[in-house]
Image (tube, rainbow, N blue to C red):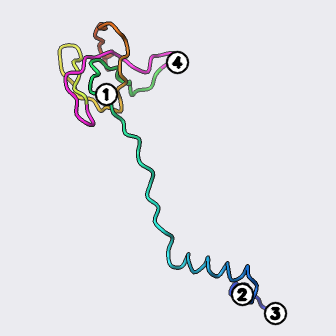
Amino acid sequence: PLILPRHFLEGDDAGVKEMQANFELLSEGLPLRLPPPRDEVSLAHDVHWVFVHINSHKKPLTPLYTGPFQVLRQTQQTVCLQIGNQEDTIAIQHCKPFRGTNSPDPGTLPRQG
């Protein structure tokens, strides 16, 4: 005899009724699950110096960060830094706070090209 998938759901067995209830839930739609909250990337507002992540291909044992650079002002997502003689705005995700006790020597960005 020919057995179709719907034949598996017919009968008085308790497992079959539970399966039918689960299929009905699926046909109505799954309940919405909100995504987990994103990790907020932020710096403390009292940070005066930061290191900047270098986004380039690096040779082995090359430092991942350069700096430290002085923080001039900060928004929720960016930091304005004094880099050499100019100001530059960088995303907070690319910054790491300087945790030293003394005022550091300002860093310079490596030459490009």
The magenta region covers 59-78
At x 46% / y 65%, what residue is drawn?
32
| Foreground residue among 1 and 25 | 25
At x 35% / y 29%, what residue is drawn?
94
Mark 1 and mark 2 lie on one chain; the one further toward the N terminus is 2
The residue where tag 2 is placed is 4
The residue where tag 3 is placed is 1
The residue where tag 4 is placed is 60
Between circles 4 and 3, the one closer to the viewer is 3
- Give the Cα separation between the discs numbered 2 and 4: 61 Å
- Residue 15's tag is none
Which residue lies most toward the left here? 86
Q: Amino acid at mark 2?
A: Leu
**Label 1, residues with CA under 10 Å away: few <14, some 14-19, many ≥20:** few
Whether label 3 touches label 2, CB < 8 Å: no
The residue where tag 1 is placed is 44
- The verdict on residue 71 being magenta is yes
Mark 4 and mark 1 lie on one chain; the one further toward the N terminus is 1
**Label 3, residues with CA under 10 Å away: few <14, some 14-19, many ≥20:** few
- Give the Cα separation between the discs numbered 3 and 2: 10 Å
Q: Amino acid at mark 3?
A: Pro
The quadrant of the image that shows the N terminus is bottom right
- Give the Cα separation between the discs numbered 1 and 3: 72 Å
